[in-house]
């Protein structure tokens, strides 16, 4: 048995969670949460933490130099830097619209990189 | 050029956008948004992280996406706006002077005005830190603009002073872009930043947050070379012997935001010493009749959803004012505060003009665990609300029902009670 501590981030309450994990790595109990969201978060954070990654990539012929972007869904936390790395060598032609898929299956996460800003072509 | 408008909104950030939409939908067609930047959306354009709009849209958007939803609505409703137009002053009779590169100095007279100028960051000069003033010291928001808008990295070895949300967000952002963030030093014994940002921007990358620590010296003549960080005691004085030097080429400051009220002050609008924003009544109207305020210019918000809600109200109220639908004010009751409550917005309430359910927003001066917020009307307690934790960094609110008040009401008091 092991107890791991997390802070629930699903709302400004920031409940302090204690997650009990058995020797097989299974979650036995989540304590300290005020609502079911905290329970789900504790379970997920203890065994497979996920994060949305956001960044910017350069644009060619756009009215902005950079377009902001995000992963289409949360990706495994340990893959954050792989995703960031995959964004280092790319650039995109304007126009770009919010929701445009810029990269599919980024860093083999099965998530896409999608644009979060409008860029007009100039 | 001089013309007349029913309503002019100063600032095209989320507050200005929502205010304009609120007013337009309440029947005001002759309105104008003035924005000094070259695009609408305000600070959200550089806030590329997600976490916006959970309350409003039930999903987590990035700053630009959240702004876009409101910009689209402004366009769909054909609300006029003028970009690259900086407001210079507001006269006694509500004539607004602004300047832009194509038309020069222009004037517009408004029946009502909504202030939505947002806030700015507390500058280095105001922090009274000894040592040199070399290159490499930026406010966190300036660094955010450089990295996210211009695609330019200000440095590689970073120390952050202050644990406000922008500083926390930038710790992660700079780490992603290849920088080494050594530490975040916070003078107070708690962080003003959201829990979520402490977890996802610092803990995730093992960046230490040092509470009750501050920068006591800055080294380097041309470019910053290192800073000295020391622990502070309860009186905010550095404790001798705790100094530690951190080599760095960049120091980011995230030491709080100040509502941008030079314009308001010049126009004779009464400001609160606590919020640094205008003192407003239940309509979000300032001491100058027909001048309303909302968003970060009124008081600093941590969640943009509340900015939009508040601004929508300001827009609706301005519309009621213009259309002459407001009842005469009867008696304005100041909201008294005590305990940990630093201020409330609104600052006062007229029961005859308040909403059926009036939202009162407030902030605490310190962390309150398992404590209560009590509301007394004429010394009768009508709200007794317990919460596991309340922190200074997170804006709180309660709802006052009109049925609880009457023209005979003498006092409204809101206080905290330690468990
Ligand atoms: C870095 C950062 C991170 C944040 N993170 C989050 C988050 O994760 N989640 C969340 O919900 N909220 C977040 N917020 C809070 C939220 O974004 C702000 O509260 C909100 O943007 C405030 O809106 P506003 O319209 O009042 O101000 P602003 O967005 O600052 O807009 C004010 C506008 O007024 C214009 N203006 C100012 N003076 C003049 C003048 N004289 N003439 C013409 N125009 C003028 C400015 O150019 C600007 O466009 C964050 C804020 C910051 C700064
Ligand atoms: S457990 Fe529920 S109440 Fe507590 S922080 Fe998480 S979401 Fe908020």
Image: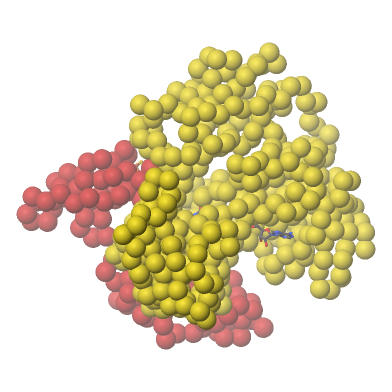
Q: Quadrant of ligand 2?
A: top left
Can residue B30 be seen at all in this image of the molecule?
no
Query: Which residue occupies 35% across, 69% down?
Result: B245
Q: Is residue B88 shown above or below B7? A: below
Q: Is residue B413 shown above or below B39? A: above
Q: Is residue B195 shown above or below B385? A: below
Q: Could you say which chain is coloured red in the image?
A: A
Q: Could you say which chain is coloured yellow in the image?
A: B
Query: Which residue occupies 47% across, 77% down?
Result: B220
Tell me where residue A4 appears, x and y as whole percent.
Answer: 19, 51
Q: Quadrant of the C terminus of chain B?
A: top left
Quarter holding residue A59: bottom right
Query: Which residue occupies 25% across, 55% down?
Result: A45
Tell me where residue B303 appears, x and y as whole percent.
Answer: 51, 49
Query: Which residue occupies 91% across, 56% down?
Result: B3
Tell me where residue B139 appears, x and y as whole percent.
Answer: 53, 66
Tell me where residue B375 appears, x and y as whole percent.
Answer: 52, 23
Can residue B306 be seen at all in this image of the molecule?
yes
Quarter holding residue B121: bottom right
In the rendered view, does B417 fall on the left or right side of B280? left
Identify the image's colour scheme: rainbow, by chain, secondary structure or one colour: by chain
> Which residue ends up furthest to the front in the rendered image?
B240
């Amino acid at each position: 048995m092991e107890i791991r501590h997390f802070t629930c981030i699903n709302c400004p309450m920031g409940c302090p969670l204690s997650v009990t994990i058995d020797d097989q790595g299974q979650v036995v109990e989540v304590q300290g949460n005020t609502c079911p969201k905290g329970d789900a978060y504790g379970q997920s954070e203890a065994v497979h933490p996920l994060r949305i990654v956001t960044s910017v990539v350069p644009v060619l012929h756009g009215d902005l130099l950079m377009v902001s972007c995000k992963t289409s869904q949360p990706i495994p936390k340990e893959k954050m830097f792989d995703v960031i790395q995959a964004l280092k060598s790319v650039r995109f032609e304007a126009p770009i619209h919010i929701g445009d898929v810029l990269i599919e299956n980024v860093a083999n996460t099965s998530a896409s990189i999608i644009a979060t800003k409008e860029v007009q072509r100039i | 050029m001089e013309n007349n408008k029913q309503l002019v909104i100063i600032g095209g950030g989320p507050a200005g956008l929502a205010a304009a939409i609120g007013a337009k939908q309440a029947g005001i067609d002759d309105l104008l948004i003035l924005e000094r930047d070259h695009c609408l959306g305000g600070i959200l354009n550089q806030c590329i992280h997600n976490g916006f709009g959970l309350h409003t849209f039930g999903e987590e958007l990035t700053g630009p996406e959240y702004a876009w939803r409101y910009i689209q609505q402004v366009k769909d409703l054909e609300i006029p706006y003028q970009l690259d137009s900086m407001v210079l002053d507001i006269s006694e009779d509500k004539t607004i002077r602004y300047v832009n590169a194509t038309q020069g100095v222009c004037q517009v007279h408004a029946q009502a005005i909504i202030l939505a100028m947002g806030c700015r960051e507390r500058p280095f000069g105001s922090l009274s830190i000894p040592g040199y003033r070399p290159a490499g010291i930026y406010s966190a928001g300036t660094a955010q603009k450089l990295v996210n808008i211009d695609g330019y990295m200000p440095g590689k070895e970073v120390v952050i002073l202050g644990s406000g949300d922008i500083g926390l967000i930038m710790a992660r952002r700079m780490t992603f872009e290849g920088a080494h963030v050594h530490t975040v030093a916070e003078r107070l014994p708690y962080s003003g930043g959201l829990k979520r940002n402490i977890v996802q921007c610092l803990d995730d990358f093992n960046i230490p947050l040092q509470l009750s620590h501050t920068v006591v010296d800055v080294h380097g003549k041309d470019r910053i070379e290192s800073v000295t960080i020391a622990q502070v005691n309860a009186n905010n004085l550095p404790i001798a012997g705790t100094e530690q030097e951190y080599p760095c080429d960049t120091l980011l400051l995230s030491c709080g935001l100040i509502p941008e009220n030079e314009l308001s002050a010049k126009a004779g609008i009464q400001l609160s010493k606590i919020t640094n924003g205008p003192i407003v009544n239940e309509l979000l109207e300032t001491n100058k009749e027909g001048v309303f305020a909302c968003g970060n210019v009124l008081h600093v918000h941590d969640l943009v959803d509340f900015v939009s809600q508040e601004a929508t109200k300001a827009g609706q109220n301005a519309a009621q004012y213009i259309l002459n639908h407001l009842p005469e004010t009867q008696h304005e009751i100041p909201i008294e505060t005590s305990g940990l409550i630093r201020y409330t917005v609104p600052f006062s309430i007229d029961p005859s003009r308040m909403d059926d359910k009036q939202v009162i927003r407030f902030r605490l001066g310190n962390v309150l665990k398992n404590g209560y917020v009590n509301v007394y009307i004429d010394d009768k307690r009508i709200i007794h609300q317990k919460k596991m934790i309340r922190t200074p960094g997170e804006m709180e609110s309660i709802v006052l029902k009109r049925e609880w008040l009457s023209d005979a009401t003498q006092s409204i008091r809101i206080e905290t009670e330690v468990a």
